[in-house]
Amino acid sequence: MGQEKKNHKGSVSIINAAGRIRLRFRFQKQRFSLNLFSYSKSNLLAAKKIALAIENDLVQDSFDRTLEKYKPIANKEAERSPVSKTLVTYFEEWVRNYRNMDCDKDVDYNSTRNMMLRWGTFDLSEVVKHFNSETFSASTYNRRLNLLKKFFNWTTKTQITLTNPLEDVLVRKVRKTDKPKRKPFNEEEILSILDAFKQDKFCPASANYKHSHYYPFLYFIFKLGPRNGEAIGLRVKHIQLEKNRISIKETLSRTLKGTNAAARIRKETKNGKERVLPLDEDLKVVLLPLLLDKNPDDLVFTSPTGVAIDDRMFQKRVFSKVLKELNIEPRNLYACRHTFGSRCIHQGLTPVMTAFLMGNNPETALRNYTHQLDLPKSLPSIERKENKNPNS
């Protein structure tokens, strides 16, 4: 039990009672106690507001002896129904109406909603405890923390809750780990892969669809390093031939229902920002045939049947098999993006410029794309330099 100092008549004490904020005061010889939320800096500010409201009502003779008037909305809901249900319902409403997403389709929102459901009946003060008990990677932890912070900022702003229980929680440090299947390709491998696709070198003679159909799609990814969904969702109107530039402003993303064309949904880019990339002459030559007789909203790259490319099936049925025939160690399609980032850094582009071209921040560019593609021919010398000044 926390220590309580004797306050002046008509004032409210704020104490730490086993990690929870508790308000205590006396009125007309009767003692009152109101339990609030977990003890934290942000919650203390909210508690002080409640305490001031009570003190004002005591002076104005409008004090509510039931204390209902002073309870946070979430606390009131807890007395009538499980808080988890209430918060999950609010979360789904926020995702649907304010984020323009769908908890049944979008992976991050679905996973976060299901995580909250697993917590069962819980109090708002227990959010931090439940969240930190989850066993997921640092990157997943940070991604969900960022999402939930935004959600609770909304509940606080709309007075569904008085505070954001995660406001003071810091992100976890993400350690760089090697991902063999995202290892960048070297120059020789890039040329070998593109040539194999262009010439249909490993495409069975009986195949209904030739590997060369995907050559422009693969060339585009190697050349500009977009995310898979950004390349798949690229529309004709995003290519400005007269200005020699390409706008990356949206993505055709996979959902929980799959990676096929029918399951994909159009979204903004991962960080919500549009970026403009240069359209070099070699890429223009590759893309021009794909733009003929198409409407502005049509996809630039399609499957042989004319729908959005299924990158998972392309990886499994085509890309992996070509790599195997070329005796190149297994890599996934995302390695092409890592290749672009690593080549930019290797060829002298700053992390800031590389990050801009890839739609990342500079820290991400340094952490993920500083791969050493080739060993240097020699290392820095440590020999003592001769003094050329004879008078010194």
Image (spheres, helix red, strand yellow):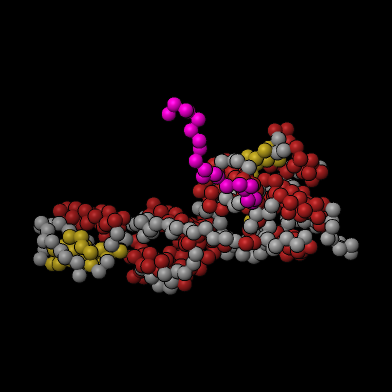
Q: Is residue 358 visible?
A: no
Farthest residue, direction right:
205
Residue ID at (39%, 52%): 157
Q: Is residue 8 above or below residue 242?
A: below
- Residue drawn where x is 43% and y is 73% of the image: 120
Per the picture, the main secondary structure of the magenta-coloured stretch is loop
Q: Position of residue 291 (x, y in %)?
A: 78, 43
- The front one of 388 and 342 is 388
Q: Residue at x 65, y 50 (%)?
A: 374
> Does residue 378 show up magenta in the picture?
yes
User: Is 337 rendered above or below residue 26?
Assistant: above
Nearer-the-camera pick, 217 or 65: 217
Q: At 42% from the left edge and 66% from the top edge, which residue is drawn?
A: 131
The number of numbered discs placed on residues in the rendered structure image is 0
State the quadrant of the N terminus: bottom left
8 left or right of 118?
A: left
Name the spot of residue 281 as percent of width and height, x first. Answer: 75, 37
Tell me which corner region of the image, top left, top right, bottom left or bottom right, holds residue 265.
bottom right
Which of the pair 153/138 is nearer the observer? 138
Magenta segment: does it hold 142? no
Residue 311 visible in the shown view: yes
Q: Say which quadrant the C terminus sits in.
A: top left
Q: Which residues are drawn in magenta?
A: 373-392
Q: Quadrant of residue 197?
A: bottom right
The quarter of the displayed image where residue 156 is located: bottom left
Residue furthest front in the image: 390
The location of residue 368, given as percent across then percent down, is 56, 53
Q: Position of residue 130 (x, y in %)?
A: 40, 68
